[in-house]
Amino acid sequence: MANKKKLPVSPFELVWYPLCGLVILWGITYVVLGLVTKYNNISALTSFDANFTKLFGLNLYFWGLIIIAIAVVSAVVVMLFFAKRYDRASEREQRRSARLNALKKEETVVSEQKAEVVEPKAE
């Protein structure tokens, strides 16, 4: 198993994980802005949060939590999909190596078997 092949990473995977990371950062930004609005008295941010709440029904903090949850769930789904693919490939390699080891074991038993001389029975 020293020369174990690595499966190539798919382009879908390379695009999806950074995209989920960016969406999580977007959600964290909303959460932080919502907390700053709640605990500090900044008039511009307070009016923005009030307008945001009127428009979407929830304030920045809760929208940030929803965005983070959606991004995390989508990242986990992608991870599970590709983990299943990699597990199938590793199981296939294990089965191949087990068959190869069984064949090698059979060959060594036959090659190490000593020749026996069978003498005919005298009657």
Image (cartoon, rainbow, N blue to C red):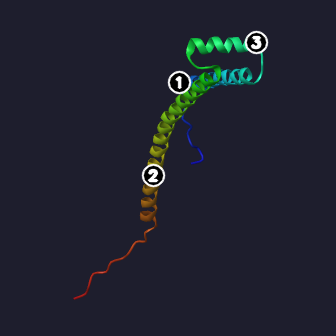
Which disc is residue 43 wearing?
3
Q: Is residue 61 left or right of residue 120?
A: right
Question: Where does label 2 land, which residue?
Answer: 100
The quarter of the picture where residue 48 lies is: top right
Q: How much space separates mark 3 and mark 1, taking CA atoms?
A: 43 Å
Q: How much space separates mark 3 and mark 2, taking CA atoms?
A: 73 Å
Q: Secondary structure at mark 2?
A: helix
Front of the two marks 2 and 1? 1
Question: Three-letter amino acid code at disc 1?
Answer: Phe
What residue is rendered at 56% in x and 15% in y?
56
Question: Three-letter amino acid code at disc 3?
Answer: Ser
Q: Mark 3 Cα within 10 Å, few/some/many (few <14, many 20+)?
A: few
Q: Nearer the viewer, residue 66 or 104?
A: 66
Q: Mark 1 Cα within 10 Å, few/some/many (few <14, many 20+)?
A: few
Q: Secondary structure at mark 3?
A: helix
Q: Nearer the viewer, residue 24 or 80?
A: 24
* N-terminal-most mark, 3 or 2: 3
Q: How much space separates mark 2 and mark 1, taking CA atoms?
A: 34 Å
What residue is rendered at 75% in x and 24% in y?
39
Residue 1, percent from left and from top: 56, 48
Q: Secondary structure at mark 1?
A: helix
Q: Residue furthest right?
A: 41
62 over 44 or under it: above or below: below
What residue is rendered at 56% in x and 24% in y?
16
Which disc is residue 12 wearing?
1
Q: Is residue 101 left or right of residue 24?
A: left
* N-terminal-most mark, 2 or 1: 1
1 over 115 or under it: above or below: above
Question: Three-letter amino acid code at disc 2?
Answer: Leu
The quarter of the picture where residue 42 lies is: top right
45 over 69 or under it: above or below: above
